[in-house]
Each structure stands twice: as C-alpha cells, then as structure tokens.
Image (cartoon, rainbow, N blue to C red):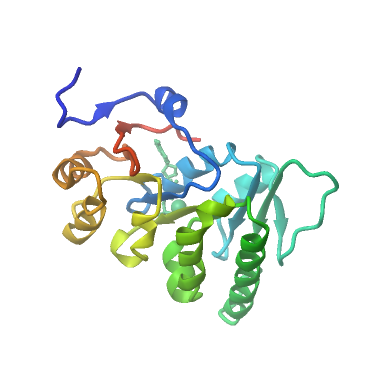
C-alpha cells in the first residue's frame, strides 16, 4: 500500500474500470489550454444516453469529431427532431457563429435548450467552455441551477475551463467528479484545494507535480483520488 499522502497512480484502463458516473452527477475538468480536457471528456460521454454538447466557437475540431465519428447530430437551433421510442439521443447544439452579431442568437438558442432540458430531465450537457457561457453569453444563473438542482432530476453537467478562478464556485462545490491538470497558479490551486473532505495540501502538491497531459481525478464525495495519463482519444 502506498503511504496515505501519495495519490495512487493508475493506468488509463484501470481508471476507466474504476470510474463510476451516475446520471445526475456533474463533472468538472480544469486545466490549461492544450492539456487534454476536451479529449478526455469526449471519451467519457459514451457512458450517457442523452447528450447535448454545446458548440460555441466558430470552429471546433472536437465537436466535428463528435459529429463525424460519434454519431452526434448537428443542430443549429433547439429542439432536436423527435425520435420515436428513443433510447438515446446525441446532439451537438451549435448555433451558427460567423460574425460577432451571431452571439445574440447563440445566447437565445443555448438559453432555450438549457431551460427545456431542465424541464425534461435526464440529459447530460457538455459545456466545454464554461467561461464563455458564463461571461460572454451570461448564462451563469442557468448553469448554477443545473449545478445546484440538477442532480435530483438526473441532469449531469460536464463542464470544462482553463482557469478555476474564472467560473462559478458551484463548478467545484457541486461536482462529484473533478479532473485537474497541472497548474502552478496560486489562486487556482486555492480554489481546487478548497473542496470539502479532501486534503488541500495533498491536492495542491499533486497538481503542481503533474506532467503534461497527466490528470488528477478527485471524487469530491468520497475523497478517492487517482492520477493517470489519459489516452489521446
Ligand atoms: N492524453 C494525451 N496524451 C497526448 N496528447 C494528448 C492527450 N490528450 C490530448 N492530447 C492532445 O493535446 C491537444 C489538446 O487537447 P485538448 O483539445 O483535449 O485540450 P484542452 O485542454 O481541451 O484545450 P483547450 O483548453 O484549448 O480547449 C490535442 O492535440 C490532443 O490530441
Ligand atoms: Mg478544450
């Protein structure tokens, strides 16, 4: 057994085997640009049946991959076309974004989608760009409703951000599963270390010691932690 203050290193295969994600549990991924957040989140989305990825950039290779290889249907406006007797549904809601004025429509479509999915329950929303959604599209309140109320109606929010200090605290306090990549920024480390039930010092030291693409997984509910190198997707 490793000493208690050392986070267990596991292979990606072992992580995938041990990782249990129930509908209604939120995931937050935080790490610098290029660390591999989107790549890993996409590999976890398979586990859910009703998934909506929110497209906010003018161009996005990951979302193109979801559409081309993972059979997500591209829609430009909510709602997706109804499917009879559906057992699963995978969409990318990606309102056209060619000029700055298009942001107004982005806001309207994503706002509507979030409200209607909330009413229906059971969805997993992949919000890869939390900063943009919160600050540019001003959807903080709605996303906070997902974080605080979603669990009981089976809504899972999978959120990604480069800087923990730039998104609502609920992204940390309300997620069951937190994935963190290397950081040396004190403010960011304080935020991640501030989670209840885990040792701030251990988390912060581990995050500082991570290699490029290596990730620290924290189950914020039971305090379980693992570090591993994910696959490239
Ligand atoms: N585990 C990995 N090992 C090696 N390379 C990886 C790994 N994960 C991702 N990459 C590569 O790193 C690059 C960035 O990955 P990704 O887009 O997932 O990062 P990101 O954290 O989402 O970045 P951003 O914050 O800019 O969206 C990609 O080219 C991807 O192929
Ligand atoms: Mg990304």
Residue 156: in sight, yes or no? no
Residue 2 versus residue 108: which sits nearer the camera? 2
- In the visual, does 13 lie left or right of 182? right
Residue 83: in sight, yes or no? yes
Residue 144 versus residue 99: which sits nearer the camera? 144
- In the visual, does 149 lie left or right of 70? left
- Toward the front, the furthest residue is 152
Residue 116 versus residue 184: which sits nearer the camera? 116
**Count of all numbered marks drawn on residues in the image:** 0
Residue, x 40% and y 33% (percent of image)?
230
Residue 108 vertical position relative to residue 189 in the rendered view, above or below: below
- Toward the right, the furthest residue is 84
Q: Position of residue 34 (x, y in %)?
A: 38, 49
Residue, x 79% and y 44% (percent of image)?
86
Which corner quadrant holds the N terminus?
top left
Residue, x 63% and y 55% (percent of image)?
121
- In the visual, does 100 lie left or right of 90? left
Residue 218 quadrant? top left
Residue 8 quadrant? top left
Residue, x 53% and y 43% (percent of image)?
42
Q: Position of residue 100 (x, y in %)?
A: 56, 79
Q: Position of residue 214 (x, y in %)?
A: 31, 37
Residue 196 versus residue 52: which sits nearer the camera? 196
Q: Position of residue 114 (x, y in %)?
A: 60, 65
């Amino acid at each position: 057994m490793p000493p208690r203050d050392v986070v267990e290193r596991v292979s990606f295969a072992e992580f995938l085997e041990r990782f249990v994600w129930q509908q209604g549990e939120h995931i937050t991924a935080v790490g610098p640009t290029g660390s591999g957040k989107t790549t890993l989140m996409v590999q976890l989305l398979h586990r859910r049946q009703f998934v909506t990825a929110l497209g906010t950039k003018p161009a996005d290779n990951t979302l193109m991959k979801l559409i081309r290889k993972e059979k997500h249907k591209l829609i430009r406006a909510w709602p997706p076309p109804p499917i009879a007797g559906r057992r699963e549904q995978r969409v990318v809601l990606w309102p056209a974004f060619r000029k700055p004025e298009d942001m107004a429509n982005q806001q309207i479509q994503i706002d509507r989608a979030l409200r209607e999915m909330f009413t229906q329950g059971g969805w997993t929303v992949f919000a890869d760009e939390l900063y943009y959604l919160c600050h540019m599209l001003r959807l903080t309140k709605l996303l906070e409703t997902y974080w605080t109320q979603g669990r009981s109606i089976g809504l899972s929010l999978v959120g990604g951000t480069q800087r923990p200090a730039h998104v609502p605290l609920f992204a940390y306090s309300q997620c069951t599963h937190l994935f963190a990549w290397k950081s040396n920024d004190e403010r960011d480390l304080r935020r991640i270390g501030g989670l209840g039930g885990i040792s701030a010092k251990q988390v912060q030291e581990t995050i500082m010691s991570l290699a490029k693409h290596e990730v620290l997984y924290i189950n914020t509910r039971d305090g379980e932690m693992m570090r591993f190198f994910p696959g490239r997707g």
